[in-house]
Image (cartoon, grey):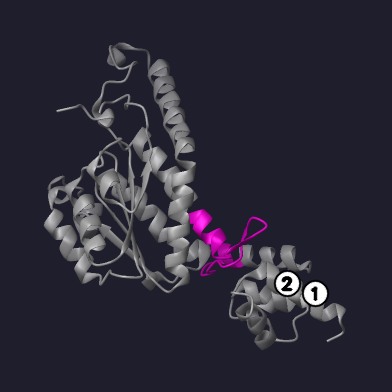
Amino acid sequence: MAQKRTEALHEHAVGLDEQPSAAILRFLADAQVEAAKAVGDAISQIEDAATVVAETLASGGCLAYAAAGSSGLMALADALELPGTYGIPRERIVILFAGGAAALQDMAGAPEDDAAEAAREVADAGLGKGDCLIAVSASGSTPYAVGALEAASARGARTIAIANNAGSPLLGLADTSILLATPPEVIAGSTRMGAGTAQKIALNMLSTLSAIHLGHVHDGYMVNLFADNIKLRGRAARIVAAVAGCDERAALQALEKTGGQVKPAILLAAGAADVKAAEELLDTNGRRLRPALSKLGALEGSGR
């Protein structure tokens, strides 16, 4: 049986425990950088996956993440941040984590071997045609991740796999596969390190590009954020002010009128007659801010 790359011994591993602390930390830091570089080789695959995710969310489908252990934590972080950052409805995000909530207190290993449980969770979530599941596994052979992907595919959902070993089962089963060919870990098999870093970067890139495709980013601003705390309300006001070219007081007034929604608040601050007019501009332009602003400018230029 061929050794998995994620289980191989790193070139600096021999005698590692005898090295000075500073040298060990340098090896660890350099390994993280090398792992991050592996993401660059997967750009086209991430691009394809982002298109799938954007199409799924645009058509009203659910986006599911399925993973175990360290990979599960990377998937969990991405999934939990989407509603607040890009305004994706929470009910459209499904998180399948081996062992469930209890694993966040005690991440036992056995649940990651339960492919049948993964299949049951896919069914319980009602995933099927029109939905998309992202399965993440460093080895690419974790039974829970493979089982979830197979079950989702059988029910008609589109599937995306992220793994760090070429030729692994997960990559072969998915509609869209992302190989993150990270080097061996400095601590052999400890995929919470390099492999996890690459997964985190890839997931960040995938979800961010998907949000851009959906029109939730404008000039680097998150214009579909859900402002549910003091920090985010302040950020929303600054975004409205920057894009609409108004002061923060006017931005806050616009946000109050739109119930905290940034896109219509920007249009309101930029000259839309009222909230209804701002919403109509967004609806007729696919909820995308840039063409809505252009249309608003054209209307103002015509004197309407």
x, y percent for residue 278: 68, 81
**Residue 105 visible (yes or no):** no
Q: Is residue 197 magenta?
A: no
Q: Quadrant of residue 235?
A: bottom right
Check the image and report above or below for 93 versus 170.
below
Q: In the rendered image, which residue does mark 1 sit on?
A: 297
Left or right for 151, reference 178: left
Q: Residue at x 23, y 67 (%)?
A: 155
Residue 102, how many percent across, how many down?
A: 20, 57
Q: What residue is drawn where x is 48% and y is 70%? A: 58
Nearest the eye: 130 or 100: 130
User: Quarter holding the N terminus?
Assistant: top left
The three-letter code of the residue at mark 1 reads: Gly
Residue range corresponding to the magenta coloring = 207-233
Please state which amino acid type lies under the numbered disc 2: Leu
Marks 1 & 2, CB-CB < 8 Å contact: yes
Q: For the C terminus, which image quadrant? A: bottom right
Q: Is residue 44 above or below residue 287?
A: above
User: In the picture, residue 267 is in which quadrant?
Assistant: bottom right
